[in-house]
Image (cartoon, rainbow, N blue to C red):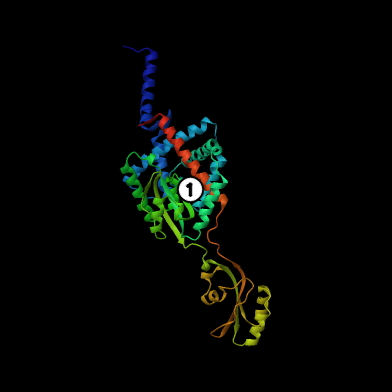
Amino acid sequence: MKLKPIYQLFIVLMLTIAPATARDVEGIAAVVNDQVISLYDVDQRVDLFFVTSGIEKNPAMIERMREQVLRALVDEKLQMQEAARVEIEIEKSEIDQRMELLAKQDNRTLDGIKEFLRESEIEEETLQAQIRAELAWNQFVRRSYSSRIKVGDREIDEQFEKAVKAVNQTRYLVSEILLNLDNFSTEEQVRQLSDEIVRQLQSGVGFPAVARQFSIAPTAAQGGQLGWISANQLNPRLAQVIRQMQVGQISPPIPTTGGIYILALADKRAGGNDPSKNKFDVLTVGFPASVADDKIAEFVSDFKTCRRAQTAGKKLKASVKRSGLKELRLLPGAAAVAVANLEAGEVAAPHAADDVTNVYIVCDRKDDLGIEISRDQIADNIFSQRISVMARRHLRDLRRDAVVEYR
């Protein structure tokens, strides 16, 4: 039986189209409100995570990361859809600026980071898409909620007073990673991934890169850096852990109602100012044994300025060295002892050592003021914490109302 031309055409079309359609369906990881996330998108983002974080690639970790990345991509789709609803568009120049910042944090140029992506077989658009979603969501959240957040003077005053009282307490230089519990389907997944992250951080993987990829805290863009804080500025669970940590240590995963925290302690110092960190610009004039004591005494009594003292010292065949501003603890022992209690423009008593008599002069002094407290920074921190909470609530609402089909 001979088929009519129309049926012949239909069969040809079916033979041509059907395999492609099947491949397309197989290549779909999820559909979010009718928008597709492909398996290729997931693979590219997983690869991006590994090359930028430095975390060791192994089959178990890859599988865990695929699930986390897919959930993150679903969130990004929802965020971009919400941004598009209010007509937020991100310019390419904004994305380039953020890429330049990321490149600088990794000691690269913009061209360098693009070359790095090419060498890693990752499309530039993969990183750009992540940045675009972040910028669009930040704009949406600030546009939607900024006007609702009021940080009053009284609240700033209270926080400022607490910070001032904390100046005399031990201060900690802390970085944080906050893992979003909403991105995990089981407690076992939370435990496995958080334990693996801690293990790899302890093995030397860079904390800032992992924070930028994983953390949902407002500090993620800064590599998780919280800066100098006292323990009582932290959640009580976190405070308990940080007090027991040693400098350079990574904490175990810390469960809280807001998510799972991982902390890094870069440094700590006792409260108040640290005299050993006072900075001195010291002029050392070393007189040889041939210079009489009365000439040295005359040199000291005639001191007016460091510049004149340098000239006068050279005329007396003395060696002249100027340190520039250095912390007291970094100065040579004899010089540090001699100038520790001197102010700028003062001269220490001549100090004989071997065949040289040294005269130490303080040309300049900058005292360590401890941790500086800024009211503006306090206000910014309160605002960031509140807007972050609102953003997470809004995203949870979007997830609840969305039609998401995982393939």
| Residue at point 63%, 74% (across, down) | 346
- Left or right of 27? Residue 365 is right
Q: Position of residue 224 (x, y in %)?
A: 46, 50
The residue lying at 51 percent from left, 63 percent from top is 272
- Number of callouts: 1
Q: Is residue 43 above or below residue 103?
A: above
Locate the N terminus by quadrant: top left
What secondary structure is marked by label 1? helix
Percent x, y of residue 158: 53, 50
Tell me which residue sits at (55%, 62%) in the image.
369
Give the x, y percent position of residue 58. Answer: 33, 47
Please determine whether, in this image, residue 380 is positioned above or below residue 33. Answer: below
What residue would you read off at disc 1? 219
Q: Residues within 10 Å of mark 1 (few under 14, many from 20)?
A: many
Q: In percent of the image, x 34 and y 49: which residue is there? A: 196
Amino acid marked by disc 1: Thr
Q: Nearer the viewer, residue 272 or 108?
A: 272
Q: Nearer the viewer, residue 164 or 181?
A: 164
Task: Note whether 341 is above or below 291 in the view shown.
Answer: above
Would you say 108 lies left or right of 288 here? left
Q: Quadrant of residue 278?
A: bottom right
Give the answer, above or below, for where 354 lies relative to 219. below
Q: Nearer the viewer, residue 252 or 102?
A: 252
Q: Nearer the viewer, residue 185 or 110?
A: 185
Work out which quarter of the rendered image holds the C terminus and state it.
Answer: top left
Query: Would residue 296 be found to the left or right of residue 131 on screen?
Result: right
Inspect this view and state whether residue 108 appears. Answer: no
Residue 235 at least partly seen: yes
